[in-house]
């Protein structure tokens, strides 16, 4: 049995890339800064002490982070001999967003520029808003600004409930986000509204419309639910996932993977909420023992619950939880399975603002028969997809170099 299990730790960057300055992110380093804050005793909420991720470190994560940013993350054992292939990759794509990162990993970098709604206030064109109000028969809208998704709920959630006007907001990413109450506005209605918005933002070249349903009765109680939906444009070319599906293999999407690839190349789709649920589902999908398959999980909480919220102890605790469970997953590997641990961009919780950070991502491959080594700096995330394509004996992708051939 031969499978590639891809564990995408959404936003887990390991050091600013050479072009980070262009994004205002020079010096950002999600992993290093979390480890530093933990080592300093500044992340003792709900957890304590140095960042404890021995299993990830054994695969080569500490070394990869050290090589990427020039500083070995404090608290991790620098003497450990990695058992994985480890390195780091820079992004070729123009943006530091989720689809760009995911598609490039699967061999399809985004070489064009996305459209952005860059004005902090009155962010959306009036004609777009008017059309959306008309087509979706809305009493109006709230927001129309750049915002953090949790702050905007605190600020406008109650007014939304009282008026029935949905909350429109965006960020530094190419997104049109719509927050609405699951019960008072209705989940179905929110999803329909997002479908209309998707059509209307196409001419603006916007990567995603995101439905952000929430529940709760007052500003203090509002909580976003697992019913988030990402309506993405199609990847510009076939990805690793399409290659696998065309070759008759199985491609399992766990979490938001299918949404991010706009359902392309996915043969099976399962969902769960939260780190624990996503981890459990990854294990149960592995238990199905389907030969010639890709099992691809997006662990979104690292990004949405901790990175964007600038929550260092939360991010650290999530990494430690993930690390603790990793041996269960490694125990399920057959002789020919490989596990890939990576990310799609950074979201340094010590960085100003609430946006992503332009960073290198970890490139960690582990398989029982894969000799451990340092694969160094990779010039594109696509090296990950190309290496998987090579390992799974799929036709070569257009971008990326397989490090199995080096
Ligand atoms: O602040 P929240 O709603 O989590 O939004 C974040 O999530 C979006 C998609 O990843 C990003 O564009 C960023 O705006
Ligand atoms: Mn992401
Ligand atoms: Mn994000």
Image: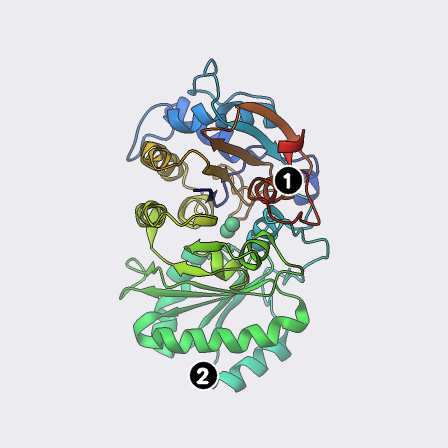
Residue 350 is situated, as x and y percent measured from the top left of the image, at 49, 36
Does the rendering let one see residue 384?
A: yes
Looking at the image, do the residues carrying marks 2 and 1 touch, with CB atoms under 8 Å apart? no
- Determine whether the residue tagged by mark 2 lies in a helix, strand or loop: loop
Query: Which residue is at the far top?
Result: 79
Q: Which residue corresponds to the image point at 36% horizontal and 34% vertical from the top-left?
A: 326
Q: Which of 119 and 237 is in front in this view?
A: 237
Above or below, 110 against 132 in this view is above
Q: Which of marks 2 and 1 is in front?
A: 1
Q: Which colour scheme is used?
A: rainbow
Left/right placement of residue 81 relative to residue 333 reads: right
Q: Which of 66 and 388 is in front in this view?
A: 388
Does the rendering let one see residue 172?
A: no
**Which of the image's four quarters has the C terminus?**
top right
CA separation, marks 2 and 1? 48 Å
Counting residues from the start of the chain, the first of labels 2 and 1 encountered is 2
Q: Which residue corresponds to the image point at 53% horizontal and 24% vertical from the top-left?
A: 371
Residue 102 is situated, as x and y percent measured from the top left of the image, at 56, 50
Residue 192: image quadrant is: bottom left
**Which of the image's four quarters has the N terminus?**
top left
Residue 390 is situated, as x and y percent measured from the top left of the image, at 61, 41
Q: Nearer the viewer, residue 130 or 228?
A: 228
Dot 2: few (<14), some (14–19), or many (≥20) neighbours within 10 Å? few
Residue 27: image quadrant is: top right
Above or below, 103 against 386 in this view is below
Residue 38: image quadrant is: top left
> Mark 1 highlights which residue?
383
> Mark 2 highlights which residue?
139
Q: Nearer the viewer, residue 257 or 154?
A: 257
């Amino acid at each position: 049995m031969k499978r590639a299990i891809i564990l995408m730790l959404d936003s887990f960057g390991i050091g600013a890339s050479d072009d980070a300055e262009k994004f205002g992110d020079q010096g950002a380093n999600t992993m290093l800064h979390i480890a530093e804050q933990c080592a300093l005793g500044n992340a003792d909420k709900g957890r304590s002490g140095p960042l404890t991720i021995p299993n990830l470190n054994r695969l080569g994560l500490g070394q990869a982070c050290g090589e990427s940013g020039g500083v070995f993350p404090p608290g991790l054992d620098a003497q450990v001999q990695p058992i994985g292939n480890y390195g780091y990759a820079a992004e070729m794509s123009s943006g530091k967003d989720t689809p760009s990162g995911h598609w490039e990993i699967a061999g399809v970098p985004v070489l064009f520029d996305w459209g952005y709604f860059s004005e902090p206030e009155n962010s959306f064109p009036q004609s777009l808003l008017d059309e959306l109000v008309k087509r979706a028969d809305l009493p109006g809208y709230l927001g129309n600004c750049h915002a953090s998704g949790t702050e905007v709920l605190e600020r406008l959630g109650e007014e939304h409930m009282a008026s029935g006007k949905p909350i429109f907001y965006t960020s530094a990413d190419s997104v049109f986000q719509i927050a609405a109450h699951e019960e008072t506005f209705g989940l179905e209605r929110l999803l329909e509204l997002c479908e209309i918005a998707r059509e209307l933002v196409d001419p603006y070249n916007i990567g995603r419309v995101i439905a952000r349903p929430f529940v709760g009765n007052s500003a203090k109680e509002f909580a976003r639910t697992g019913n988030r939906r990402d309506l993405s444009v199609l990847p510009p070319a076939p990805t690793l996932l399409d290659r696998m599906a065309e070759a008759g293999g199985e491609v399992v999407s766990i979490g938001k993977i299918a949404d991010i690839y706009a359902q392309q190349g996915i043969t099976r789709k399962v969902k769960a909420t939260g780190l624990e649920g996503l981890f459990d589902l990854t294990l149960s999908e592995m238990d199905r023992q389907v030969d010639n398959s890709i099992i691809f999980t997006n662990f979104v909480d690292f990004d949405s619950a901790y990175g964007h919220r600038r929550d260092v102890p939360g991010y650290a605790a999530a990494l430690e939880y993930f690390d603790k469970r990793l041996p269960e997953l490694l125990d399920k590997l057959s002789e020919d399975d490989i596990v890939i641990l990576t990310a799609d961009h950074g979201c340094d919780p010590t960085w100003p603002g609430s946006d992503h950070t332009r960073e290198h991502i970890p490139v960690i491959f582990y398989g029982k028969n894969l000799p451990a080594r340092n694969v160094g700096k990779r010039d594109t995330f696509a090296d990950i997809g190309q290496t998987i394509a090579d390992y799974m004996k799929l036709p070569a992708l257009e971008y990326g170099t397989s490090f199995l051939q080096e």
